[in-house]
Amino acid sequence: MGDVTVNVNNESKKKRSQLHDVWRRFRKSPIAMTGLCVVVFMVLVALFADVIAPSDGRNPGYDIHNLGNRFQAPNAEHIMGTDEFGRDIFARVVHGSRVSLLVGFIVVTFSMTLGVIVGAIAGFFGKVAENILMRFIDVLLSIPPILLAISIAAAMRPGMMSIVLAVGIGALPLYARVMRASVLTVKEQEFIEAAYSIGASKFRIIRKHVLPNCIAPIIVQATMGLAYAILWAAALSFLGIGIQPPTPEWGAMLSEGRMYIRDHWHMVMFPGMAIAIMIFALNMMGDGLRDAFDPRLKK
């Protein structure tokens, strides 16, 4: 029993030290930390949107129409101006962060879960399972992701569910291929042979040994995939087949303001800046995670 306790303690300390090394390398990158701070800030804005931009009749809420205040330029009362219905653009951008981030997280969770399952089965079992699953992935890869997303979304009723399925299915091949490549590397290691030698089942080996050792590239892919999910969701909403007005979503706000862009630039500038800043921050954080998880950077 004493030896078992020592081994468990050593494994837990090893895991903690590995996470500590990853965090130490990540925080050494100013670009990565800047991206992380921006992402955390945007998440906090989304969580506390009702506090930052309340809509109670006394404040310029995102859903309050006031035709007397139409097309106001940025001023002291409306720091980002108002739209064609007199709604406060700052409030709509703040509440739009909640919608855009929620869609992004759901899409990434959906595509990552399916992609990890498909990639793990294809990489670990090989043969018939690999041929069937990876040929299906190749079919998806043969179609440009944005065209596939548009086709799926156009065939469904516009809304969050259509965006999740459209963007999620389009992003699935990326996770599946990354997972398969990682599994092919890990399954040849000696500790997998040791697990076989003590009678562990294949599914237990996948769950206990393969997946934990393949999680690093999936985390990096998920971080960058969140940026693409937000961008594609905004594109679908801009085309009118995603989140529908009057829901405050950044892409839908761009679509509403494009016809007024010549005379009322603020209607498209601020939601466009929100999309650009969020995508840029997620890409910076993803690059930092990729470098932090790269074992070749260990000293």
Image (cartoon, grey):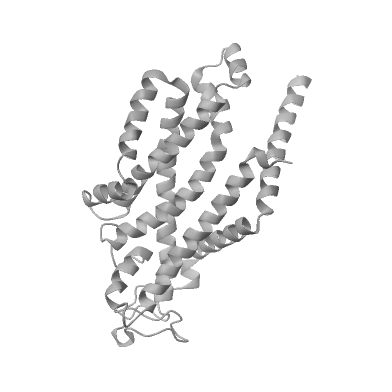
* Residue at 67 percent of width and 42 percent of height: 297
Percent from the top left, x then y, of residue 181?
49, 31
Q: Residue furthest left?
A: 155
| Quarter placement of the N terminus | top right
- In the rendered view, would you say 286 is above or below 276? above
Percent from the top left, x then y, of residue 195?
60, 17
| Quarter placement of the C terminus | top right
- In the rendered view, would you say 179 is above or below 251? above
Left or right, 147 with respect to 40, comes to left
Percent from the top left, x then y, of residue 76?
47, 86
Left or right, 69 with respect to 125, comes to left
Q: Is residue 88 visible?
A: no
Q: Is residue 82 visible?
A: yes
In the depicted view, which residue is nearer to us: 68 or 293? 293
* Residue at 45 percent of width and 67 percent of height: 274
Q: How many marks?
A: 0
- In the rendered view, would you say 177 is above or below 253? above
* Residue at 39 percent of width and 24 percent of height: 130
* Residue at 40 percent of width and 65 percent of height: 96
In the depicted view, which residue is nearer to us: 238 or 31? 31
Say which quarter of the image contains residue 254: bottom left
Say which quarter of the image contains residue 88: bottom left
